Amino acid sequence: MNIVQSGRMKAVASTILKDRFSWFLLPWIISGSSFVVNLITAYFANGEITTGGVASLYIYMFAAGIMSVSNTLPFLLGFSVRRSDYFWGTGGVIGLVGVICAAGLSLLSYVESEWLDGWGVGLYFFHLPYVSEGSVAVQFLVYFLLIVFLFYLGFLIACVAKRFGKNGMFILAIAVLAIGTVWSYVMTQQGWWIDLGQWLADRTMLEIAGGTAPLTLLYMALSYALLRRTSV
Amino acid sequence: MSAIVKVTNLTKSYGDTAAVRGVSFELEENKIYGLLGRNGAGKTTIMHMLTAQQFASGGDIEVFGEAPYENESVLRRVCFIKESQKYPPMFTVKDVLEVSASLHPNWDAAYAAELAEAFGLPMKRKMQKLSRGMLSAAGVVVGLASRAPLTIFDEPYLGLDAVARTLFYDRLLEDYAEHPRTVILSTHLIDEVSRLLEHVLLIDQGKLLLDRDVERLSGMAYSVVGAAARIDSFVSGKSLLTRDAMGAIASATVLGEASPQERREAAERGLEFAPVSLQQLIVHLTSGTKDEREAIKL
């Protein structure tokens, strides 16, 4: 790859990152406000509180994946940017944001469990049973993989919408619903739900998060293929 | 002169509707082209395909000798300013200029700042808060300051007042003289830009109707005014574009060039000749019903 090309990817990344607030602050404001509410609740409650409020950060990343396409793709394609540069430039951004978020979450999990032991009020917000098992490095990897996975799920959905419009989304929704219905029927019919639950329970969080990696790569490949055929 | 754009038999269809039908043309380096035609003629679609933002249904496009699709070396030499350009929600004018600087190798930041000032663009204002005219002005600034070897303006003047439009035309000519490049101007305000244009491409109903140097356009048609009966006898057998009558006086616009003998005869019969402006010519060529327009032979 020559310098000019990487320069254009950088231009894509810096275009996306112009909105610093949405990438670096908003995810923390959202999960932070959930944290504060829980902190107040924990202060007045008796006993420990373990909550999944941090999920809001992951949901935000899913939404960011959807929003990112409509916010920046039409602009950049209109400004003579290649689709592939758009794709990899976006990838660079989510890589960076993923690393920062995962590092922040790991740090907070460490502080919560090792230093402050539930922030003095018995609140477990960042250090959750099962999810936060393992060393800080393992946790970092788990958080990072989940963030990237959710971002690209949103990104893929937005690419389908961009490429195939409303009708495409409609067909996709019906297809997902139909497949889900059949799958769950077969699972019930065969009595496989228990087995699945058991199988999942035997996996560590790292194994589950690692399992999302091939899916993330699949979402990336599909969204790349869709972007290549997207017009403005 | 070398061709930097080569379009061969280009078509674009949406389902059963053909927006562009077998268009072929070449653009030479360092010339200002007018891409003219009515709304929905297919101009914007052609420009989107030239810049690989939309896909052709058929035909071939070469820009700087290569296919533009996903082609870095082509796209970084192209700047397409379009009326429908979208901007990220948080973007300010300053952000747009900064990103443009990183995308266009010939970008002149000082010139951009000077232009922004001349157009009265508020640098810190969000793009989405700009008026239509200011939005157009921002596009004009990017288009001029990019100094891209192929610069395309699609209806760049929407919402701009006459003063700002004149500023745009003057700056374009000035900068073009100093930094020659190929410019495509797609516009409805033909009279306003006719002094800028060197070559005209006229698109009508998805087809290329006219591909000619402006110098050679003036001889394409003429109008003649006089007593209605004499006009009728004069134009009979000629390729008539329009005929209007007001009482006993009629005027007719005729395609082609009148020979000196025809002019003499007409003058003897008290008929007066008048040149046809580019705008009048384009209007005559592209008005009327579908059949009437298709019957015109150039």
Image (tube, coloured by chain):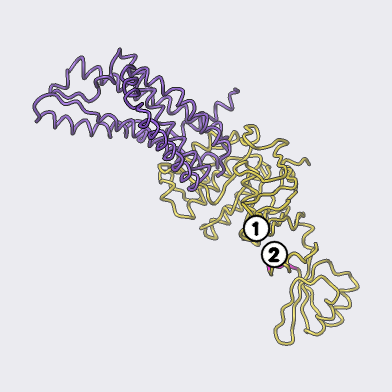
Chain colours: A purple, B yellow
Query: In which quadrant will I find the N terminus of chain A?
Result: top right
| Secondary structure of the residue carrying numbered label 2 | helix
- Give the x, y percent position of residue B189: 62, 60
Residue A26 lies left or right of residue A70; in this view the side is left
Residue A103 lies left or right of residue B108; in this view the side is left
Main SS of the magenta part reads helix
Q: Closest to the observer: B33 or A37? A: A37
Dot 1 and dot 2 residues touching (CB under 8 Å): yes
Q: Looking at the image, is A66 positioned above or below residue B187?
A: above
Q: Closest to the observer: A182 or B86? A: A182
Q: Residues within 10 Å of mark 1 (few under 14, many from 20)?
A: many
Residue B223 lies left or right of residue B134; in this view the side is right
Q: Chain of mark 1?
A: B
Q: What is the quadrant of residue A27 in the picture?
A: top left
Under mark 2, the amino acid is Thr
Which residue corresponds to the image point at 72% horizontal and 82% vertical from the top-left? B245
| Secondary structure of the residue carrying numbered label 1 | loop
Residue A73 lies in the magenta-colored region: no
Label 1, label 2: how far apart the Cα atoms are: 10 Å
Q: Which mark is residue A182?
A: none
Q: Looking at the image, is A115 positioned above or below residue B84?
A: above
Q: Are marks 1 and 2 on the same chain?
A: yes
Q: Which mark is residue B41?
A: 1
Magenta region: B276-287
